[in-house]
């Protein structure tokens, strides 16, 4: 999960504490009426964006599906995002709306 962390504390080789943010998936549902972007569709959108914006990158090194924590409401949500690593920067393609952003 991007932008989240878990801290593990060890004492004398034994795990003594764990801290971080717990995200319950008990009430998780798929957004109705929305179709998530496939890896191929996300990559094609990214390549179109690269061409149209004049972005300088020669190759895509890797692509991963990651999850970003959305804490803008009272309920925490995990949002699927395609992370595209190029030879210059890392970009994020939102699986819901296809928005492309530079990873900060």
Image (spheres, rainbow, N blue to C red):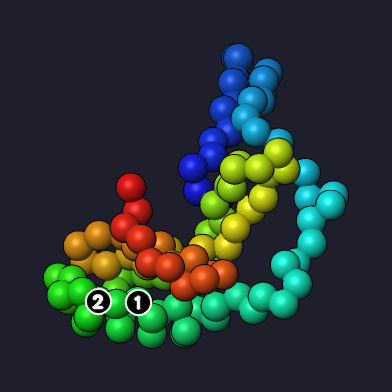
The residue pinned by badge 2 equals: 50
Query: Relative to 45, does residue 89 appear above or below in the rendering?
Result: above
The residue pinned by badge 1 equals: 46
Label 2 residue SS:
helix
Q: Name the residue located 66 percent from the left edge and 42 percent from the top edge.
A: 73
User: Mark 1 Cα within 10 Å, few/some/many (few <14, many 20+)?
Assistant: many
Residue 59 position in % (x across, y down): 23, 76
Left/right of residue 66 with respect to residue 92 in the rendered view? right
Residue 45 falls in image quadrant:
bottom left
Left/right of residue 3 with respect to residue 74 in the rendered view? left
Residue 103 position in % (x across, y down): 35, 54
User: Mark 2 Cα within 10 Å, few/some/many (few <14, many 20+)?
Assistant: some
Q: Name the residue located 14 percent from the left edge and 70 percent from the top edge.
A: 56
Marks 2 and 1: in contact by CB < 8 Å?
A: yes
The residue lying toward the viewer, choosing from 94 and 40, is: 94
Q: Is residue 57 visible?
A: no
Pick out the residue farthest to the top: 12
Marks 1/2: CA–CA distance = 6 Å
Query: Relative to 17, does residue 37 appear above or below in the rendering?
Result: below
């Amino acid at each position: 999960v991007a932008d989240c962390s878990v801290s593990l504390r060890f004492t004398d080789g034994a795990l003594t504490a764990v801290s971080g943010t717990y995200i319950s998936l008990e009430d998780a549902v798929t957004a109705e009426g929305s179709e998530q972007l496939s890896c191929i569709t996300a990559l094609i959108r990214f390549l179109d964006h690269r061409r149209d914006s004049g972005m300088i990158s020669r190759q895509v090194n890797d692509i991963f599906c990651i999850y970003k924590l959305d804490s803008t409401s009272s309920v925490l949500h995990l949002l699927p995002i395609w992370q595209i690593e190029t030879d210059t920067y890392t970009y994020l393609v939102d699986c819901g709306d296809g928005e492309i952003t530079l990873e900060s």
